[in-house]
Image: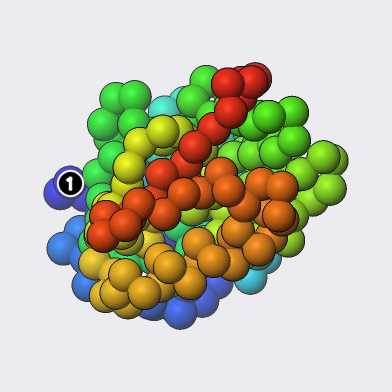
């Protein structure tokens, strides 16, 4: 992408996404206002800062997708604890958090221009129900056991959703680190074990056996036959 990506924010871009300065892609900055949308129609992508003023970011997303003749793909920067607030009608293609690495950020920006790879809530993300007990909703970033909401961190939810999306597959710790934590995460496989242990504890004694340890390899999500997707 030769033209610079535009980021709408009232802060320094590196305060919102610290690793953005490491990108080879040029970034230009404009105020987080609807007025700025007049000048971004031809940008290859638009990053909206939702970390400090989420309501303003939401309104700008709405206006950009509904009024611009050729709106650029929208990438929302948002704090992890606010992810459940995102709704399909915001029109964003994807999102990142301030902790997103430069490699992942560059990859997500690239995927905005790859057909079929953008985030489509209605078409690509369906809730998963397991044994009429566990429900995982990737749109609202929530999981429930018999209707009771699980108090999961963002990474715990991502791990649970990844397991449920790869039912019956043996997944190594290295693959989990790459796909759930990010391309250049250096925390080590111990991080996976700790998160799996916490996840099992939160699932409770009746469901913790869904996550099976495969000795010297990794983990497998064993699902009863009555599992279904909605």
- Is 142 on the left or on the right of 80, as rendered? right
Q: Quadrant of residue 122?
A: top right
Q: How is the image coloured?
A: rainbow
Pick whichever, 181 or 77, lies toward us: 181
Q: x, y percentage for residue 53?
A: 67, 65
Work out whether 103 lies above or below 67. Answer: below
Q: Position of residue 188 (x, y in %)?
A: 29, 74
> Is residue 17 visible in the rendered structure shown here?
no
Q: Position of residue 100 (x, y in %)?
A: 39, 65
Left or right of 57: which side holds 73? Answer: left
Q: Which residue is mark 1?
A: 1
Q: Residue at x 68, y 29 (%)?
A: 131
Front-most of 183 and 28?
Answer: 183
Q: Secondary structure at mark 1?
A: loop
Tell which of 218 and 120 is nearer to you: 218
Instruction: Give the class, few, some or many, for how many residues have Cα within 10 Å of label 1's Cα (few <14, many ≥20).
Output: few
Tell me the residue at 50%/62% (across/down).
196
Q: Which quadrant is home to the C terminus?
A: top right
Q: Which residue is painted at 28% across and 35% down in the image?
A: 113
The quadrant in which residue 23 appears is bottom left
Q: Nearer the viewer, residue 142 or 35?
A: 142
Residue 87, position as x, y percentages in the image: 67, 39
Q: Is any atom of residue 176 visible in this view? A: yes
Total of numbered circles in the picture? 1
Give residue 117's quadrant in the image: top left
Residue at x-position 49% and y-position 53%: 159
State left or right for residue 212 relative to residue 189: right
């Amino acid at each position: 992408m030769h033209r610079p990506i535009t980021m709408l924010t009232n802060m320094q871009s590196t305060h919102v996404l610290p690793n953005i300065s490491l990108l080879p892609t040029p970034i230009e900055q404009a105020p987080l206002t609807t007025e700025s949308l007049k000048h971004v129609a031809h940008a290859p992508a638009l990053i909206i800062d939702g970390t400090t003023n989420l309501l303003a970011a939401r309104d700008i997303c709405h206006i950009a997708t509904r009024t611009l003749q050729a709106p650029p793909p929208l990438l929302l920067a948002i704090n992890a604890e606010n992810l459940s607030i995102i709704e399909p009608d915001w029109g964003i293609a994807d999102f990142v958090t301030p902790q997103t690495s430069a490699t992942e950020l560059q990859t997500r920006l690239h995927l905005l221009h790859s057909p079929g790879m953008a985030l489509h809530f209605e078409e690509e993300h369906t809730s998963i129900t397991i044994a009429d007990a566990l429900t995982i909703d990737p749109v609202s970033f929530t999981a429930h056991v018999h209707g009771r909401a699980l108090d999961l961190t963002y990474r715990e939810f991502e791990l649970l959703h990844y397991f449920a999306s790869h039912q019956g597959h043996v997944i190594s710790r290295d693959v989990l680190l790459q796909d759930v934590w990010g391309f250049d995460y250096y925390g080590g496989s111990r991080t996976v074990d700790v998160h799996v242990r916490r996840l099992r504890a939160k699932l409770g004694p009746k469901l913790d056996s869904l996550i099976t340890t495969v000795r010297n390899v990794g983990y497998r999500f064993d699902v009863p036959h009555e599992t279904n997707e909605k």
